[in-house]
Image (cartoon, rainbow, N blue to C red):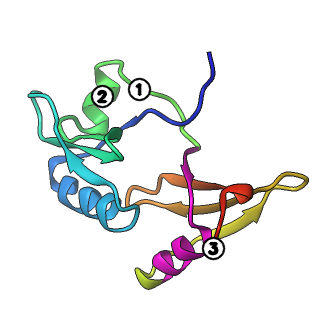
Amino acid sequence: MATLSIHHYTLMCSPAQLDALVDFYTRVLRLEIGPRPALPAPGAWLYAEGQPLVHIYAGLTIERMASAGMETGALDHISFRCRGLQETKAHLRKHGIVFDELPVPGRPIYQLFLRDLQGLKIELTFFLEEEHE
């Protein structure tokens, strides 16, 4: 078995936060809204090249999750494998997104770190040998 890239992650939010989160992930990370099964709460599945990467579930508050024993623990960040480093940096700047840059010492990998509207840290990972800009 080889793990090649993230499959998806689920983000919990309130119904009032749903539209802003969908806007962030579609506008800034350019994911696309795609098919989602009929679930008991509002939400969205966001896709890249036919793969659902981010599931947003707007049905439970953090307090209700905690009282039901559904805490998921600490989550430091989610990493997405990306291409187009220079274009991505320009795109983030255009949208006023603050990000940190970090080349990985001794490896041909370059990382950008940003935060979504919930404060979740997102890493965009670029393999420099794949960059043709």
Q: Nearer the viewer, mark 3 or mark 1?
A: 3
Quadrant of the image for the N terminus? top right
* Amino acid type at mark 3: Glu
CA separation, marks 2 and 3?
45 Å
Q: Mark 2: give few (<14), some (14-19) or many (20+) Cα within 10 Å.
A: some
Q: Is residue 10 left or right of residue 7?
A: left
At 66% from the left and 63% from the top, the residue drawn is: 131
Quadrant of the image for the C terminus? bottom right
Q: Which residue is mark 3?
A: 133
CA separation, marks 2 and 1?
6 Å
Tell me where residue 4 sits by quadrant: top right
At 56% from the left and 66% from the top, the residue drawn is: 84
Q: Which residues are magenta?
A: 77-93
Question: Could you tell me residue 62's position as x and y percent?
Answer: 31, 37
Q: Mark 1: give few (<14), some (14-19) or many (20+) Cα within 10 Å.
A: few
Q: Which residue is mark 1?
A: 71
Q: Is residue 4 above or below residue 122?
A: above
* Amino acid type at mark 2: Met
Q: Are marks 2 and 3 in contact (CB under 8 Å)?
A: no
Residue projecting furthest to the top? 1
Q: Are marks 3 and 1 in contact (CB under 8 Å)?
A: no
Residue 88 colored in magenta in the image: yes
Secondary structure found at label 2: helix
CA separation, marks 3 and 1?
42 Å
Question: Could you tell me residue 107's position as x and y percent?
Answer: 85, 51
Q: Are marks 2 and 1 in contact (CB under 8 Å)?
A: yes
Q: Which mark is residue 62?
A: none
Q: Which residue is mark 2?
A: 65
* Amino acid type at mark 1: Glu
Residue 106 colored in magenta in the image: no
